[in-house]
Amino acid sequence: MLEELEFGFPILSMLLFLPLLGAIGLWTQRDTELIKKTALGVALFELALAALVLLRFIPESAAMQFTERLNWIPALGISYHLAVDGISILFVGLSAFITVLIILYSWDTVQDRAKAYFMSILALETTIMGIFVSVDLILFFVFWELMLVPSYFLIKLWGVGADRHYAALKYVLYTLLGSVFMLVGFALLSLNYHDVTNTYSFDLLDLLKVPVPVSDQLLIFWLIFMGLAFKAPVFPFHTWLPDALVQGPIGMSVVLAGVKLGTYGFLRFSFPLLPDASTNATVVVIVMSLALAAIVWGAIIAIMQPDFRRLLVFSSISHLGFVVLGLFALNFQGLQGSLLQMINLGFTTAGLFFLAGFLYDRLGNTLLDNCGGIASKMPLLATFFLIIGMASIGLPGTNGFIGEFLILLGAFQAHWVYGAVAVSGVIFAAAYFLWYYERAIFGPIGEHVPQVLKDLTQRETIIAVSLCVMIFWIGLYPSPFLRMVNGSLQAVMDRLDRGSIASIEQDRTLLSHARALEPERQDWAMAIRNPESAIHNPIAPEPGGKD
Amino acid sequence: MSDLLVILIPVFPLIAVLVNGLLGHRYATDLAGRIAVGSIGLSFLCAVAVVAGVISDPTPREVIAYAWIFGGDLHVNFGFLIDPLTAVMLMVVTGVGFLIHVYSVGYMHGEDGFTRFFVYMNLFMVSMLLLVMGNNFLVLFIGWEGVGLCSYLLIGYYFNKVSAAKAATKAFVVNRIGDAGFLLAIFLVFVNFKTLDYLKVFENANQLSVEMATAITLCLLVGAIGKSAQIPLYTWLPDAMEGPTPVSALIHAATMVTAGVYMVVRTHVFYDMAPVSMATVGIIGGLTALFAATIGLVQNDIKRVLAYSTVSQLGYMFLACGVGAYMAAIFHLVTHAFFKALLFLSAGAVIHSLEGEQDIRKMGGLSKKIPVTHAVFLIGTLAIAGIPPLAGFWSKDEIMAHAFVHHHYVLYLFAAVGAFLTSFYMFRLTYVTFYGRSRVDPKVEHHIHESPRVMTVPLMILAGLSVLGGFLGVPPEHGWFHGFLESVAAPVGAVTHEVGMGTLIGLMAVAIGIALGGWGVAHYLYTIKPGTADAWSERFAVAYRTLLNKYYVDELYDAVFVEPCKRLGRLWDWFDQHVIDRVIREIGRGADVSAAGATWAEKHVIYGGLNVIGYANHLAAWSWRKLQTGLVNHYAAVIVIGLFLLTHFLLVWLTGSSLL
């Protein structure tokens, strides 16, 4: 079938290493202007590459696409294996998009050690891309941990709060703590594979071929859960978030609030690999309780926050509750809504952080006391604030509604109680956002508001407009996005419905039909599509093992 | 009639929103006004063409624009449904909407943010059109929340005013409570029918159990109550009067607030199956009609009187739905749109001529100075009070007669008393505003002027409609209007009561008597014996103050819902910072353990290559100890775990799943 390289070169590797190369390139520069321009150029080129991948992605398919594979540590079955499918494809686009906006935002706002800052941002982009394009669990884990390095420095060195050192350390330690559990979980998965096949592998596609005994699934599920829960963060593991997002620089807050790494992991690993544990009634009830608690907890606390960035943190926690709720509703609408909502938050919550940044740059903080009547001084800011805020609270016609509606519909179908409790979050969201808006943006001009308050600059307007374009595009015509994710989500759904053993049987039958069409196992440079998985979930050609 | 014509109806105002919104700052406000009004005019013409098509062929017709949300078993189109009910709503929305837009050009002349005003108004029209034209529940919901947003923006139009900003937030949040109920109803519909398209859903509605129909309709009702300002969610509407007066006319009288009524009639197939819900709708409507009218008796702000009057009239529409008189509900919706828009706009003309004065205690004797405004206001008053043959008489009488004939005597009583009060407070308003001696501030007095033509002409047209509009529905229950709506709004399986002509004429006579009675009392109190009203308010001071303060309902809601919520927010915030975080840090102390675990994994699993992670963990454990500050609070841990277990068990109990 598709024997030729997609573009004649390994595009995912380029996507992965371009920002890193860019960062190294910046090292040699001295001129700050040039550094900024180079950084922006690299980020834009990266965005173009990502757009290319999105455009050439075959929608409505469960296949791993643009596959690249190279053995790394053969003894342990660890490989450099990159690919994207419906679950990861949108994140690739989102990360590239967000990075461009962050660089635009930081253009004038970061004066101090600008070179190191832009290097960190680009390095961060590489690690995030790595998380989304890795198919090998260890490769994934490496990027997952590496991401902490630029993050740590970004918070510590360019943080805006007095407690930034504490916040940076806390963020790293909390994530590490979870990661340890996750690594043990990954190891157990590989051990299980070894039990069956007598070889080690950490390749997701290999692991998917071997059923994990139901008794072990629960343990592995919780181990991986810990890693994801800390990173996401899932209530009650969220307490690093207020520190990191309020003390850290806006650019970092945008990434942490906008790119949902933790919840991505559930769709990527937990559900397909551990379908029986994921659908276990006890697991579901526990996780759903946490999700509901997060929704209400975050929203109620957000109401009383006098600092807009802290408000956003708790609104984030509440939104994340929705995402988890949709995932563990374990039906198509829930999964679809959650996946879409993870992307949406990259435009809405992240967008609001940008706006908080615009305010911060002018007022020195985002406290209510320093605001009041901003609308009459900055009508543009007020307008975008409202549009993005409305998207964040799920107004129909914006992207937030599509995600939230699907999640709630999914949760309601799982059990009406879930839907009924979660829907209260919709009310509280309106309350916390509009109450803040009423006091900060509306109302008479506050006494601490400076006489001269410049409205959005051209660069800031570009950021806000591009976010709004995405917000309305997904809100009014989500079709292209839905088509991209639907195939893979259906595959995940199938595994969840059948449980692991039946799924693998199913895969095998499909495989025997596909065998005639299939090329030999791909070399790493042969970035070709995986044809047999076009029919069903990703599986590798040779069914290894003793059975 | 082509599909394009249907799609163009909401597209014209949308184009105006985009043009004025994005480019409006580049040209003069006159042009912005022309674009805005012109777009509604075009939209109205398209609507007329479409409605003409419906009159010749009332078969429902779907127009699909594109597939909106899909995946799994869900498929929702962005589509429109054109049937007689939509046709009626289209005429009201675009027709009255157009007149109000024209009027606004005069009313808002010279205001800051003139263009912004029209962007919001046009956006409102887009949303309202989606609301009435959608072919499924989700498109209805876009419009539903869209109109809420525009209402928010327009209430908060004078955003520097604290009261306006507060009123805007309140309107949106209270509406959101209703919307949450509406969402639940949508979920229930989907769970039962696997589709959200009206035609498919209503076709199969008879498969529902009575319990399910009741659940769906009660959830829908929560939505309708929020949007249409019924008890207990009506409190936002009087505050919404902070917006400019044309907004009150368009959104908070003629169109948006009637969306709840439209929705109940649209889904009446469900309601017909659920007697409990029907009774609830009727009781809520009846109570609201009466309750709001009593508050309207003593208010002194001209717009607030009209606001409570709107709440009360919406109550009549709900009452009509509750007794199965869907056509009468829509009929009253239409006539109310005419005369209430007229009343609000002429009140606006009064306010305009008095340079912003809204307090009727500072008016009086205006009839000679602004004769046109006076004349149209009087027509509006006669229409709402139910004096024949004006529009309000026919629609209100039909509702009351229907309630009586179908043996809902209590509701009839509510409606009758409400009608008496309506007549009274409206004539009170007219007398105090336009007659007697002038109490106008002398500084304002010599500026009083009649409004420009751009405002008075729409008033005259609305006055004409208020006089003649009722004849659409004559004779009661068998007029042209009823024939037109028959196919979509006739109750399913209702028993027809053959009633003698004598009964109907008797009921009509009673209704006329009630209306005249209210007028008479107002006449007595405010022209024959002025001062009596003041004396009474002193004599019944407690009752008077209770009414003046709107039964203290706002204060009650604050104390019961808003304040506890805020306290909870503060409490949880503290808990989050001081307890949960500490517990997690305690767990972090266990990093020693996890490090050991990792070392184990390292030894047994990942020999070679990955040693670094094990060391990292040892490092981590060391740092954890450094991060540790203050005392170990074991009690805190117990509380968190306890809370979690509590919610956990609660959910297990509610969902009936097994535990471990």
Image: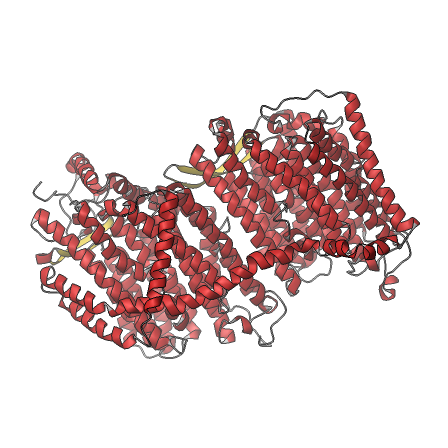
The figure's colour scheme reads secondary structure
Q: Is residue A158 left or right of residue B21?
A: left
Q: Quadrant of residue A466?
A: bottom left
Please say if B203 is above or below B393.
above
Q: Is residue B208 left or right of residue B241?
A: left
Whole-percent x and y of residue A407? 40, 47
| Residue A246 in view here | yes
Q: Is residue A99 left or right of residue A8?
A: right
Please say if B311 is above or below A304.
above
In the foreground, A206 or B639? B639
In the foreground, B467 or B509? B509
Whole-percent x and y of residue A479? 41, 44
The N terminus of chain B is located in which quarter?
top right
Identify which residue is drawn at 36% across, 74% down: A34
Q: Is residue B588 left or right of residue B418?
A: left
Whole-percent x and y of residue A357? 46, 69
Whole-percent x and y of residue A306? 51, 69
Numbered marks: total = 0
Identify which residue is drawn at 63% across, 53% down: B236
Q: Quadrant of residue A333?
A: top left
| Residue A8 in view here | no
Please say if B205 is above or below B378.
above
